[in-house]
Image (cartoon, coloured by chain):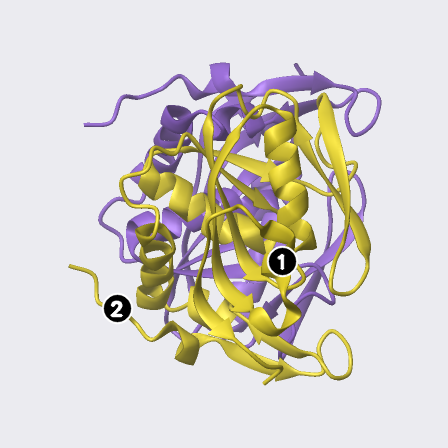
Chain colours: A purple, B yellow
């Protein structure tokens, strides 16, 4: 039996990072707490209980931390999405807008086989650009997106509007910049 | 009982990446294979069986993938080392030389408490610069390094010489550029 830790209380808000007016949600305080880290992984998986998941896909860098532990616990493979130039083999690319800038992610062409079931995992749902790019990369390879599991949702940024039709689950929500 | 997968056969060598003459060890083929990923985590932990480990420390980005799953399985906290400018709170910095360039990592000042036991995890031991910086950051915070667990060692680069006095364990070794 896992204790359900109050994860919100483990997240540190750092004002004005990376720029003035942003209340940055720092999850290092949560990750370094063994119980909170374990509970985060369990809670992020709970919504998808009983679904077959072949692969977990996460974007660098913070996404890797939660995605990898979830893949491990599910007994799934782990697929990293990386910034351009990092993956060494044949790959696909998707460009997207983030809360702060323009960016792109790449995936290896052999990372997902046609028909495999995929859970996309990230630490944060902000404007949704990263996660929308992740769904596109998975689907271009023929993968079926079972859902998207997020630790922290900033619902005031309305990222879910970019992810219509997907089963999006988040554990901790902030409905204002606080 | 875990099946002991032949992990070496799951690693893809990509010639001339990121530059001519380097035989890049691509672990994405291993990570996306659920059994190989799981077996990697188990084998990387096996050497440290029975040791108390409070925190697992890994450097971005690939290090996060194995470090996080090992922290989860051990029931330890996870501490990320990040490139300058990424961590939002009070931090320490260590500079180091890599196989390709100069770089630095940072750690939050509250990431490790004095006397906590730490396992450092990375995907690759090349020249040892990254891992030496990791030991310094942990020790500057008063942590005790139980050991260093590595998936792939490139022993011809003699990285262990920078890590004398530490219990360094690697699962797959390459003793020449191959």
The CA distance from mark 2 to mark 1 is: 29 Å
Closer to viewer: mark 2 or mark 1: 1
Q: Position of residue A65 (x, y in %)?
A: 51, 44
Q: Please identify the quadrant where the C terminus of chain A is shown.
A: top right
Q: Residue at x 46, y 49 (%)?
A: B167
Q: Residue at x 80, y 20 (%)?
A: A21
Foreground residue among B5 and A119 = B5
Q: Position of residue B59 (x, y in %)?
A: 61, 46
Q: Chain of mark 2?
A: B
Does any portion of residue A2 appear in the rendered image?
Answer: yes
The residue carrying pointer 2 sits among few (fewer than 14), some (14 to 19) or many (20 or more) residues within 10 Å by Cα, namely few
Foreground residue among A111 and B126 = B126
Q: Position of residue A47 (x, y in %)?
A: 32, 39
Q: Is residue B140 left or right of residue A20?
A: left
- Which label belongs to residue B161? 1
- Kindly identify which residue carries mark 2: B4
Q: Is residue B104 left or right of residue A131?
A: right
- Quarter location, residue A161: top right
Q: Secondary structure at mark 1?
A: helix
Q: Is residue B22 above or below residue A131?
A: below
- Quarter location, residue A26: top right
């Amino acid at each position: 039996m896992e204790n359900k830790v109050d994860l919100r209380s483990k997240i540190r808000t750092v004002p004005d990072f990376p720029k003035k007016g942003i209340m940055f949600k720092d999850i290092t305080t949560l990750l370094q707490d063994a119980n909170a880290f374990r509970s985060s992984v369990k809670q992020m998986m709970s919504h998808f209980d009983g679904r077959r998941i072949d692969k977990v896909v996460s974007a660098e860098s913070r996404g890797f931390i939660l995605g990898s532990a979830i893949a491990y616990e599910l007994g799934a493979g782990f697929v990293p999405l990386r910034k351009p130039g990092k993956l060494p083999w044949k790959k696909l690319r998707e460009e997207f807008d983030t809360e702060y800038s323009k960016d792109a992610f790449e995936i290896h062409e052999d990372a997902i086989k046609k028909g495999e079931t995929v859970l996309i995992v990230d630490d944060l749902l902000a404007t949704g650009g990263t996660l929308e790019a992740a769904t596109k990369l998975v689907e271009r390879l023929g993968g079926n997106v079972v859902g998207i599991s997020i630790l922290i949702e900033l619902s005031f940024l309305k990222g879910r509007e970019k992810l219509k039709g997907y089963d999006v689950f988040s554990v901790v929500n902030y409905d204002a910049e606080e």
